């Protein structure tokens, strides 16, 4: 599996690169898989593909603090990220892993692999709900998936030193909640991993046996996606 340990300058470019890596795998003549790790410097909000912005995000609070709101290509609810939140993206091939066409199996496989990698370092890590990772009953990772014909993109957040009050500041109560949340407010529901970023990065790299990629990252496709999608209000605020 190729490793792209690469953070681009803007949230729009970073979201575009996740999608561009999926596009590259979809168009390749041979099965291609990769792990990407990145971390933004400043806070930003990312909506799910079908999120309703005013139902999930406090737009005025974000505007007052200059926190941009973007929309990703995968599903799920809105998240807040930035420094202290390591982002990962996996592109996995159906040719190599046909069982992942069943979405429940994809969740079990990816969440199980990451949980097993982190448990020796962080303690009681569990896969809860559809695709959350928790310490006990506190969530530190939210994840989502985008399925295509030949490959899938599975990506998410890993909180390790994030200013947690920012979650309550930016996000409203989500419209869909897993049972284990028990209607708790954000402040009583999310937590940081007790890890530094470097052990976290190395655990993920080892878990997926990732090596520095032999292919260059798709610069032209990223630029196209930024211009046509991720920097456009009619994409980010379309619902």
Image: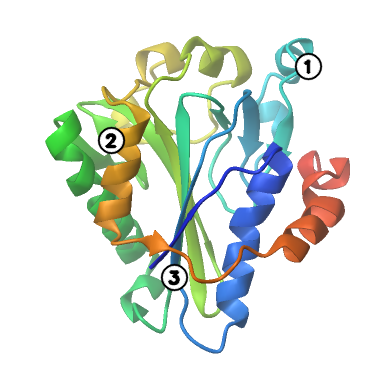
SS for dot 1: helix
Distance Cα–Cα, label 1 vs label 3:
37 Å
Above or below, 147 relative to 188: below
Q: Nearer the viewer, mark 1 or mark 3?
A: 3
Tell me the quarter of the image containing the C terminus: top right
Q: Nearer the viewer, residue 216 or 231?
A: 216
Q: Earlier in the sequence, mark 2 or mark 1?
A: 1
Residue in the picture at 59% in, 20% down: 172
**In the shown orientation, is residue 107 left or right of residue 113?**
right
The residue that label 3 is drawn on is 33
Q: CA distance from mark 2 to mark 3?
A: 23 Å
**Image spot of residue 15 (x, y percent):** 65, 48
Q: Please tell me which of labels 2 and 3 falls first in the chain.
A: 3
| Residue found at x 42% / y 78% | 94
Q: Position of residue 130 (x, y in %)?
A: 36, 47
Q: Secondary structure at mark 2?
A: helix
Say which residue label 1 marks.
63
What kind of element bears circle 3? loop
Residue that badge 2 annotates:
199
Give 18 or 205, whichever is nearer the viewer: 205
The mark closer to the camera, 2 or 1, is 2
- Vertical order, 165 against 21 (above or below): above
- In the displayed structure, 142 sits above or below 26; it is above
Which residue is drawn at the image coordinates 26% and 53% (left, top)? 206
């Amino acid at each position: 599996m190729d490793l792209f340990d690469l953070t681009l300058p803007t949230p729009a470019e970073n979201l575009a690169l996740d999608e561009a890596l999926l596009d590259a795998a979809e168009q390749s003549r041979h099965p291609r898989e990769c792990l990407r790790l990145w971390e933004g410097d400043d806070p930003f909000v990312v909506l799910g593909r079908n999120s309703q912005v005013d139902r999930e995000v406090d737009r005025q609070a974000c505007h007052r603090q200059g926190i941009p709101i973007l929309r990703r290509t995968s599903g799920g609810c809105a998240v807040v990220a930035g420094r202290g939140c390591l982002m990962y993206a996996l592109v996995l091939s159906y040719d190599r892993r046909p069982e992942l066409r069943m979405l429940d199996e994809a969740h079990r496989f990816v969440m199980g692999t990451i949980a097993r990698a982190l448990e020796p370092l962080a303690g009681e890590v569990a896969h809860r709900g559809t695709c959350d990772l928790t310490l006990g009953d506190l969530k530190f990772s939210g994840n989502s998936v985008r399925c295509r014909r030949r490959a899938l993109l599975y990506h998410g957040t890993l909180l390790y030193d994030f200013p947690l009050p920012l979650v309550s500041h930016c996000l409203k109560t989500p419209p869909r909640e897993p049972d284990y949340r028990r209607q708790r407010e954000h402040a009583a529901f999310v937590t940081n991993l007790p890890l530094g970023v470097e052990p976290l990065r190395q655990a993920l790299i080892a878990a997926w046996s990732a090596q520095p990629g032999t292919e260059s990252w798709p610069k032209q496709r990223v630029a196209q996606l930024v211009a046509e999608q991720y920097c456009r209000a009619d994409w980010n605020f379309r619902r």
